[in-house]
């Protein structure tokens, strides 16, 4: 098993295409923002919040998601959105992450009473990312040391589920206006409105909205319920990813690809777990998984792998070596390494690559493929020719870093 130094993994060009803004804030910034807005936190020190909220281990997915109520609360402020986006880009740049796709659900942050609309929220996020991009691309690192430029895209998340209270002012008001609608009608209507806004703001305002996502509780809220939403995105040339196979069986992944035209899959952890399949029409679960895995591998549908996050939200995984990433590698699937939530999972892209290469057999050629998929299968908000050229530059830089660290494929 080939292992790599932390220095090499930090130096090599990387991407992070599964990166939640509201799960990746700096903890000290969260405290300052909460104090400014007079928002109650369980603690007002880094140590206190890491002990009570942002832990190294969680009992379940519910506990893992607990901290988002605090991050979303402070992000209902345009200045804070801009700051959090800027700081996230800076933190990524410092560890050699040249391309990121920042995702979040804008409707969780909308509050019309404070001037927070989908457009102003996304504009504030873009302002922060754009500022960090300009600073880095005009820096010594790029101009003199000839490192690849930093670029980014924004992925807007539709929520699989929400209720009439507690999620956000936007969703609360929506339930009031649609008083006679069923829950799923309200939820899918909100998702469609988010996608319409994404297309319009991309086309009319030039915001780098690179794609859409479907996030939230999988069980009880299957991807097929959002088929029309994704069809609208598909017809408007919008890239698509779906959280699937994070907390539900392989059929969830199948639906994401066949019903929602997913270009990538978020997590995909349950793909190789027959015990999680619940569909009654799937009788031969082993064969179903074999066929689905082969289908995904053949299509080169990229799985956004988030190792630490999966360990924290799936307590049944007793060791990293039990992670289904091993099966993905064995089945020659297209994968890329991501953080999911830098704050909530207390991780970095470098840490995730270190975790992967220390525990799974990843020779240099395979490592280069994983890195390449993050660029080649990104939702880069330019045209295809520009994306290919950018990916090529990063992979040429990967070769330079290998030479610098005297690492060869032999």
Image (tube, rainbow, N blue to C red):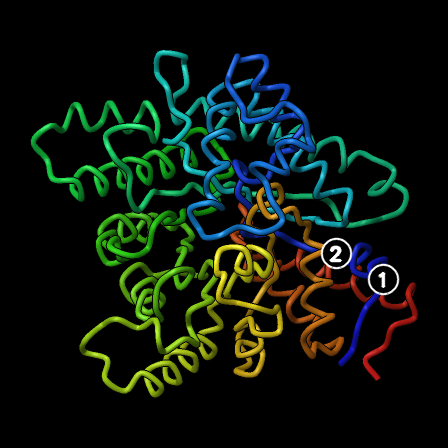
Task: Tell which residue pokes out farthest to the left in this image.
Answer: 180
The residue at the point 7 percent across, 31 percent down is 180
Classify mark 1: residues with Cα within 10 Å, few (<14), some (14-19) or many (20+): some
Q: Are marks 2 and 1 in contact (CB under 8 Å)?
A: yes
Quadrant, the C terminus: bottom right
Expressed as whole percent of the image width and height from the top left, the position of residue 375 reads 62, 58
- Which residue has dot 2 on it? 13
- Secondary structure under the numbered disc 2 in the rendered image: loop
| Of the pair 366 and 151, the residue shown nearer to us | 366
Q: Horizontally, is 59 left or right of 188 in the view?
A: right
Expressed as whole percent of the image width and height from the top left, the position of residue 192 reads 26, 40
Expressed as whole percent of the image width and height from the top left, the position of residue 8 reads 84, 61
| Of the pair 5 and 64, the residue shown nearer to us | 64
Q: CA distance from mark 2 to mark 1?
A: 8 Å
- Which residue has dot 1 on it? 401
Quadrant, the N terminus: bottom right
Q: Which mark is residue 270?
A: none
The residue at the point 33 percent across, 48 percent down is 233
The residue at the point 50 percent across, 29 percent down is 70
Residue 400, quarter of the rendered image? bottom right
Classify mark 2: residues with Cα within 10 Å, few (<14), some (14-19) or many (20+): many
Q: Horizontally, is 13 left or right of 272 in the view?
A: right
Q: Earlier in the sequence, mark 2 or mark 1?
A: 2
Expressed as whole percent of the image width and height from the top left, the position of residue 409 reads 81, 80
Residue 80, quarter of the rendered image? top right
Q: Horizontally, is 142 left or right of 163 in the view?
A: right
- Secondary structure under the numbered disc 1 in the rendered image: helix
Residue 120, quarter of the rendered image? top left
Instruction: Relative to 341, say whether 301 is above or below.
Output: below
The residue at the point 53 percent across, 50 percent down is 58
């Amino acid at each position: 098993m080939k292992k790599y130094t932390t220095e090499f993994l930090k130096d090599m060009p990387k991407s992070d295409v599964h990166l939640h803004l509201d799960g990746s804030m700096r903890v000290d910034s969260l405290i300052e923002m909460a104090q400014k807005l007079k928002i109650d936190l369980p603690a007002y020190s880094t140590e206190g919040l890491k002990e009570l909220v942002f832990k190294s281990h969680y009992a379940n997915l519910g506990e893992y998601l607990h901290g988002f109520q605090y991050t979303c609360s402070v992000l209902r402020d345009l200045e804070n959105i801009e700051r959090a986006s800027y700081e996230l880009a800076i933190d990524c740049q410092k560890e050699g992450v040249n391309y990121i796709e920042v995702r979040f659900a804008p409707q969780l942050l909308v509050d019309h009473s404070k001037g927070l609309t989908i457009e102003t929220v996304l504009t504030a996020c873009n302002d922060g990312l754009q500022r960090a991009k300009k600073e880095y691309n005009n820096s010594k690192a790029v101009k003199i040391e000839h490192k690849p430029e930093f670029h980014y895209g924004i992925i807007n998340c539709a929520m699989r589920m929400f209720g009439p209270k507690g999620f956000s002012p936007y969703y609360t008001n929506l339930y009031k206006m649609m008083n006679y609608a069923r829950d799923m009608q309200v939820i899918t209507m909100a998702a469609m409105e988010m996608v319409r806004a994404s297309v319009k703001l991309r086309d009319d305002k030039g915001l780098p909205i690179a794609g859409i996502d479907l996030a939230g509780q999988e069980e009880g809220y299957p991807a097929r319920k959002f088929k029309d939403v994704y069809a609208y995105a598909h017809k408007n040339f919008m890239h698509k990813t779906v959280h699937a196979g994070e907390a539900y069986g392989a059929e969830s992944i199948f639906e994401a690809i066949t019903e929602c035209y997913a270009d990538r899959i978020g997590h995909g952890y349950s793909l190789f777990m027959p015990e999680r399949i619940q569909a009654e029409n799937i009788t031969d679960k082993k064969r179903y998984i074999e066929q689905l895995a082969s289908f995904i591998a053949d299509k080169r549908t990229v799985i956004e792998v988030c190792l630490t996050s999966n360990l924290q939200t799936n307590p049944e995984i007793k060791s990293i070596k039990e992670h289904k990433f091993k099966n993905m590698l064995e089945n020659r699937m297209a994968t890329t390494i991501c953080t999911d939530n830098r704050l909530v999972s207390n991780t970095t892209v470098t840490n995730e690559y270190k975790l992967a290469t220390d525990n799974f057999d990843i020779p240099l050629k395979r490592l280069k493929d994983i890195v390449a998929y993050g660029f080649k299968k990104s939702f880069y908000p330019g045209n295809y020719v520009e994306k290919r050229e950018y990916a090529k530059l990063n992979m040429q830089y990967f070769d330079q870093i290998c030479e610098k660290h005297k690492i060869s494929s032999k």
